[in-house]
Amino acid sequence: MTSSADCPVCGTLVMPLARACVTCGAKLRGKAVGGKPASIYDPLFDLSSLSHGQRTEFSQHRLTTALSVDAAILLHFATMGLFSLIYFGSMHSKLPMVKHDDFGARRAIGFSFIPFFNLYWVFRFWLRLFDRVNLQMRLRGLRPAVSKRFMLATVIVSLIPGANLASLVVHPICIERMQDTCNRIVPEASGQYKSMFEEL
C-alpha cells in the first residue's frame, strides 16, 4: 500500500494517486521527489504547476512601504535588535499564508520571548521569513537575493557564546539583503517605491 504525502503548496495530507489537492486545488502531477512532493518554498519547486488563480493569490501581500536599508541597519543597532524582531516579525502577517504551518506576526514575535523555546524559534522565525520572501521574488520572475545558508549561518553565529561577536558583521549583511529583497516587491503603481527615512 502506498503512503499518502503532504500537498507541496498548502501542506494538506493528500492521497498518493491524487491529481489535485482537495484543499487548495494545486496540481500534483509529477511533483514527487523521493516519494514526497517538494515544498512550494523549495527553489526547485515548479511554479508552473500552480494555476493562474493560485499564482495571483500567493502573490498578494500587504508590504506597502519600502524602508531604507541603511535605516533598517541603524535601527537594528540602536534598539539592540528589538526593531528587527518587531519589524521583520510583522512581515509574517503581511505575507500570504501559503502553507498550513505559516504563522503571523503575533506568533512570530510572541514566541521569541518564551525562555529556551526561543532558541528553537529563532530558526523558524528567520528561515520561514526567508522562504516566504523568496517565494514572492520567484513568483515575480526575480532571482532571490537572500541565501538560505547565509541566513542559517547568521542565526547559528548569533547563538554561540563568544562567536556571537561575528554577528556584528553578519547581521547587518543579512538585514541589508532581506530589506533590499522586501523593497523590490513593494512597488507603487508608478513603479517607484514609498520610502521611509529617505534622508538616512
Image (spheres, rainbow, N blue to C red):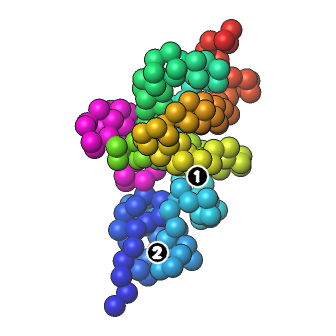
Question: What residue do we see at 73% from left, 23% from top?
Answer: 192
Q: Is residue 27 visible?
A: yes
Name the amino acid type tagged 1.
Arg
Q: Is residue 57 visible?
A: no
Of residues 110 and 155, the one nearer the viewer is 155
Q: Is residue 139 above or below residue 74?
A: below
Disc 2: which residue: 36
Callout count: 2
Question: What residue do we see at 36% from left, 82% from top?
Answer: 3
Q: What x and y, as percent, mark residue 157?
A: 50, 43
Q: Is residue 171 magenta?
A: no
The quadrant where residue 64 appears: top right
In the figure, is residue 149 to the left or right of 2? right
**Which quarter shows the C terminus?**
top right
Q: Which residues are magenta?
A: 97-118
Question: What residue do we see at 46% from left, 25% from top?
Answer: 81
Residue at the top extreme, as displayed: 199
Disc 1 residue crowd, few under 14, some 14–19, many 20+, Cα 10 Å: few
Question: What residue do we see at 48% from left, 31% from top?
Answer: 88
Q: What x and y, as percent, mark residue 105?
A: 38, 33
Q: Is residue 76 above or below residue 121?
A: above
How far is mark 2 from mark 1, CA to CA? 23 Å
Disc 1: which residue: 149
Foreground: disc 2 or disc 1: 1
